[in-house]
Amino acid sequence: MMDKKLVFATNNKHKLEEIRAILSQSYPIVSLDEIGCSEDIPETAETLEGNALLKAQYIKTHYGYDCFADDTGLEVKALNNAPGVYSARYAGESKDSKANMRKILRELEKQSDRSARFRTAIALILGGKEYLFEGIVEGKLIEEARGNAGFGYDPVFVPEGYTETFAEMGADIKNTISHRAKAVEKLKAFLDENRLD
Ligand code: IMP
């Protein structure tokens, strides 16, 4: 019988909460802390999919667990999809969200097209095989940060069909419409169809 426990290759508390809210009824999710992994897993690929795979492969190789990993980027149309895979360190290695937002708003000052999207890639390693899932939420970047919930670029991103930013609407709504939610829904559907126990 398959152990239903799945390692999620992250220690980001926001992401763990988001993903547990979606998946935990069917699958107990275990974080890196909980398997005693405190290394910095290399994220040196040039695509979101590549980084997600690197992280999942690292856990499978070093710890032996079935696992999944995600990588997310903000893709801004007028900036040729930048910052993309470099979203966390857009304004420098300190990975400072406020500095990242300031930089993106400055870059967009002269642009009329403010459309952007969050894109998440999830890599799953299950029973020795690798699978990829993608989730996208389209929207636009506003001119000044609004709201306190969430993390990263949430205060400057308004998803299509809404007037509030991700940081204003709060987790309950964000978790039903976000890039990560969509990718995790695909992961969940796959796991439900392919459970081995
Ligand atoms: P990660 O690869 O999922 O850690 O995301 C990389 C970077 O993208 C983060 O450091 C954030 O700046 C940004 N990001 C990822 N997901 C979100 C989100 O849900 N809201 C806002 N920013 C996000």
Image (cartoon, rainbow, N blue to C red):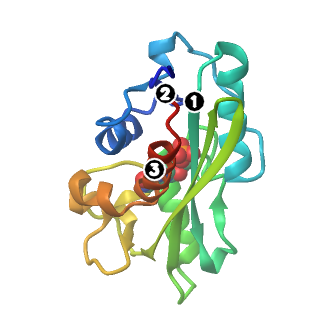
Circle 3 is placed at which residue position? 184
Q: Is residue 84 above or below residue 116?
A: above
> Which amino acid type is shown beneath numbered disc 2?
Leu
Disc 2: which residue: 6
Cα separation, mark 2 vs mark 1, equals 5 Å
Tell me, yes or no, whether the two marked residues, 2 and 3, touch with CB atoms within 8 Å: no
Looking at the rendered structure, the secondary structure element under dot 3 is helix
Q: Is residue 64 above or below residue 107?
A: above
Instruction: Please provide percent x and percent y for residue 145.
Output: 34, 64
Q: Earlier in the sequence, mark 2 or mark 1?
A: 2
The location of residue 197, given as percent across then percent down, is: 47, 28
- Please name the residue that numbered disc 1 is placed on: 67
In the image, is 77 to the left or to the right of 160?
A: right
Labels 3 and 1: the sequence-earlier one: 1
Residue 43 found in image quarter: top right
Q: Taking the image as drawn, is residue 99 in sight?
A: no
Q: Is residue 121 visible?
A: yes
Secondary structure type for disc 2: strand
Residue 191: numbered disc: none
Q: Are marks 2 and 1 in contact (CB under 8 Å)?
A: yes
Amino acid under label 1? Cys
